[in-house]
Image (tube, rainbow, N blue to C red):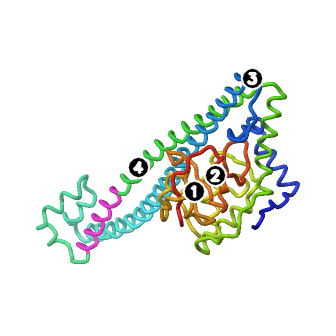
Amino acid sequence: MASHRRPKQSNHTYASVLTATAAVSVVMSAQSASADPLPDPNKKGVQAQIDRLYEEATQATEKYNGAKEAADELQGEADNLQDTVARKQGDLNELRRQLGSVATAQYRSGGLDPSVQLLFSADPDAYLDRASGFDRLSARQSETLERFLDQQRALQQQRSQAGEKLESLDDTRRELGNKKKEIQGKLAEAQRLLNTLTAKERSKIAAEEERANRSSERVELGDEPSASGRTASAFDAAKSRVGMPYVWGAAGPGSFDCSGLTSWAFRQAGVSLPRTSQEQANAGTRINSLSALKPGDLIIMRTDLSHVGFYAGNGQILHSPKPGAQVRYESIARSGMPFMWGVRI
């Protein structure tokens, strides 16, 4: 069977990893299935609380990612509408200039045609209901006037739409800020709890986490092929990120949260995936059995679908698991998260 070896990181990359994880490097918890019990039951309870806070933080991160994706989409739609409004305003100004030239010419020739006066009225739309007045305009003038009024109505509608998009964007940005505070609060609480442990106990937890990270150097993946070329390409991209730190809200190339890793990897293969694990759970063909998965298929974890990774073969998942951890391989059975289903892209 083939054996995966993690490539050595450069000194620069290693320093970047240390910097990115400095705030959370001491809040690392061991996998419950493999950790040796701490001697003090109360201390073991503290570790369980830290693990729970990590899980809640990663769940909140996926909600943050969803809000950020919505905010980016709304910003793009608002920008497009504002660009359209600006262009239509230019067209409208040109039509206004043309009609103004007609009015000037008529005034100089002996008076302003009443039909042209509607351009300067407070309610030019009302004039269209008095169609008999158009016989005073030439066909060309009537066409220009119709275009002016049509574009004026369209401009008002698009300005209204742009305003609605901007209001929705403000609401989404407030949600984004609330999710950010929630995540930071949970990580701060995890740090506070960890500080109640002794230096020896913290060192033990950190050593166990480091062993989990180093296990990626010795993992046996087998030689089963991926289901498609693009899946294989995405999986290869993800494998190149082993050792990169988990950072909430990050989507590469030097740090990742769980769905950030999968979306980044597929983007390298020319495939656009939704940003959140919940959306990725419905992005392709559902595979309900672990035994039917191929390397590179997505694995959806937890009942709320808040975690995603790659099936790596031989019962392993390649993922960015939690704060303080690195992108790594782990046994699915010992990950501590229930498998929901797989997704083949």
**2 or 1: tag closer to the N-terminus:** 1
Tags 2 and 1 touching, CB below 8 Å: yes
Q: Is residue 57 left or right of residue 94?
A: right
Label 2 to label 1, Cα distance in Å? 9 Å
Please tell me which residue is depicted at 61% across the width and 75% down the height of the picture: 229
Please tell me which residue is depicted at 67% across the width and 44% down the height of the picture: 322
Residue linked to disc 2? 332
Residue linked to disc 3? 40
Q: Is residue 286 above or below residue 31?
A: below
Coordinates of residue 261 in the picture (x, y in percent): 65, 56
Q: How many marks?
A: 4
Q: Element under label 3?
A: loop
Residue linked to disc 1? 299
Q: Who is closer to the viewer here, 215 or 228?
A: 215
Three-letter amino acid code of the residue under disc 3: Asp
Which tag is nearer the camera, tag 2 or tag 1? 2
Q: Residues within 10 Å of mark 2 (few under 14, many from 20)?
A: many
Tags 3 and 4 touching, CB below 8 Å: no
Label 1 to label 3, Cα distance in Å? 36 Å
Q: Who is closer to the viewer here, 332 or 197?
A: 332
Please tell me which residue is depicted at 64% across the width and 37% down the height of the picture: 54
Three-letter amino acid code of the residue under disc 4: Gly
Which tag is nearer the camera, tag 4 or tag 1? 1
Q: Residues within 10 Å of mark 1 (few under 14, many from 20)?
A: many
Q: Is residue 41 above or below residue 217?
A: above
Magenta stretch in the rendered image: 141-157
Coordinates of residue 44 in the picture (x, y in percent): 70, 27
Residue linked to disc 4? 163
Q: Element under label 4?
A: helix
